[in-house]
Amino acid sequence: MGIDIVHKNDRKVHRKEPKSQNVYIRLLVKLFRFLSRRTTGGNFNKVILKRLFMSRQNRPAISVARIVRQMKSRPDKTAVVVGTVTDDSRIFEVPKLKVCALRVTEGARTRIIKAGGSIITFEQLAVESPLGQNTVLLQGRRTAREANRHFGAPGLPKTHAKPFVRLRSRNHEMARGKRKSRAYKA
């Protein structure tokens, strides 16, 4: 009698490289792989490397407004975003910021530079602060996607999941489970 090995835990799912074939991301991976291997003192480079591997869904955009709010108490530090920095027309004044990001939209770029700030690439960041000195790592909200509003079971009590319907009216999503006259009311 042989012993059967449990195979249910065999598949380890974590990325060792980016799925993207983008040349720029691949070069950054080479750079930060080297830095994370060679530098001691903190996990800054390891975190950036891990975020470079992430899918675009897990690298959500962050607005200038959120960066301004986070950097208010840290005026002379660099905001590091492994993702996109987008403009936010809801704020009128952008203070002087130093931002390092994979991508910055045209509107955000003009506003940051107009305020006397600067935008640097990850290669420049690696030269300036290889250990992540005077930097603040920021991320956008992953749950900000419209798809997240639909997660859960709509119609059940105490859930706020958004149903997939054309419009909200008396005639839509008002059948079983919604009123006593249609079987039951949840």
Image: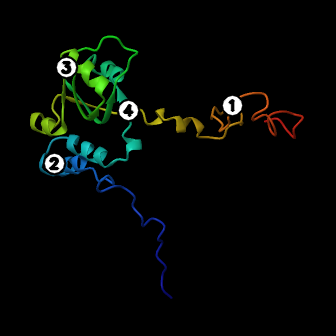
- Which color scheme did the rendering employ for the protein? rainbow
CA distance separating discs 3 and 1: 45 Å
Mark 3 or mark 1: name the one nearer the start of the chain.
3
Q: Position of residue 60 (x, y in %)?
A: 38, 36
In the image, 128: left or right of 53? left
**Residue 40's image quarter?**
top left
In the displayed structure, 22 sits above or below 78; it is: below
Secondary structure found at label 1: loop
Q: Position of residue 12 (x, y in %)?
A: 39, 61
Query: Would you name the residue on which mark 2 appears?
Result: 31
CA distance separating discs 2 and 4: 24 Å
CA distance separating discs 4 and 3: 20 Å
Q: Position of residue 89 (x, y in %)?
A: 38, 17
Mark 1 or mark 4: name the one nearer the start of the chain.
4
State the residue lying farthest toward the right. 181
Image point 16% across, 48% down: which residue?
31
Query: Would you name the residue on which mark 3 appears?
Result: 117
Mark 3, Cα crowd under 10 Å, few <14 / some 14-19 / many 20+, is: some
Query: Would you name the residue on which mark 1 appears?
Result: 167
Total residue callouts: 4
Q: Position of residue 163 (x, y in %)?
A: 66, 37
Query: Would you name the residue on which mark 4 appears?
Result: 140
Query: The disc labelled 2 sits on which kind of residue?
Result: Leu
Query: The disc labelled 3 sits on which kind of residue?
Result: Gly
**In front: label 2 or label 1:** 1
CA distance separating discs 3 and 2: 26 Å
